[in-house]
Amino acid sequence: MTPDAVAVAVMIILLFPMGYFTLASPAFLLVKLDIPPVAQLLRGMFNAHFLAMRVAGLIATVALLLDGRPLAAIGVGLLAALAIGGRRWFLQRMDEQLSASEAGDTSAAGRLRRLHWSGMLCNAVLLAALLASIPYISASA
């Protein structure tokens, strides 16, 4: 593969799960999160997103390392590390709010909504950073 093809492949590998999450997650803003199946579906979507970003990030990191782009690989590796470490932290917070909601805490849905917003914001920031890095990754050959 040519250097530009590797950069394009890496971007596609990373943009697919991030783009899907960006399009799918706002739909949960239209429903109440105090409905247990809806909240569980939201948790499942975040879990799947973190797992997809873990796999995509690791594949992209290896591809960049094999292509001789260590600086780009470090950046993408940090994205993968964030997905690996962030998953546990984020899902624990979601589980706490789901348990609180089941126990009758009426404000748990609001805290779950704030977690939802923060997850969407983090994804948007990372997506913007990834899009902004495209010229640098493709030019670093």
Image: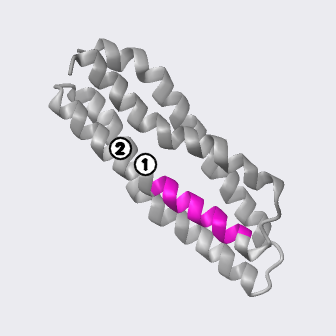
Residue beneath the point at 65% across and 50% down:
118
Could you tell me which secondary element the residue under label 1 belongs to? Answer: helix
Secondary structure mostly seen in magenta is helix
Give the residue type that dot 2 points to. Answer: Gly
Q: Looking at the image, how many numbered discs can be counted on the residues?
A: 2
Number of other residues with Cα within 10 Å of mark 2, as a class: few under 14, some 14 to 19, many 20 or more: many
**x, y (%) of residue 11?**
40, 29
**x, y (%) of residue 35?**
79, 73
Residue 64 in the figure: left or right of residue 45: left
Residue 118 in the figure: left or right of residue 132: right
Give the CA separation, mark 1 to mark 2: 6 Å
Q: Which residues are magenta?
A: 38-50
Residue beneath the point at 47% across and 55% down:
50
The single residue placed furthest to the front in the displayed view is: 1
Residue 113 in the figure: left or right of residue 90: right
The image shows residue 97, relative to residue 49, as above or below, that is below
Give the numbered dot on residue 57. 2
**x, y (%) of residue 7?**
32, 23
Could you tell me which secondary element the residue under label 2 belongs to? Answer: helix
In which quadrant will I find the C terminus?
top left
* In magenta stretch: residue 7: no
* In magenta stretch: residue 40: yes
Residue beneath the point at 29% across and 16% down:
4
Give the residue type that dot 1 points to. Answer: Met
Q: Nearer the viewer, residue 3 or 76?
A: 3
Residue beneath the point at 70% across and 69% down:
39
The single residue placed furthest to the bottom in the displayed view is: 103
Residue that carries the numbered disc 1 in the rendered image: 53
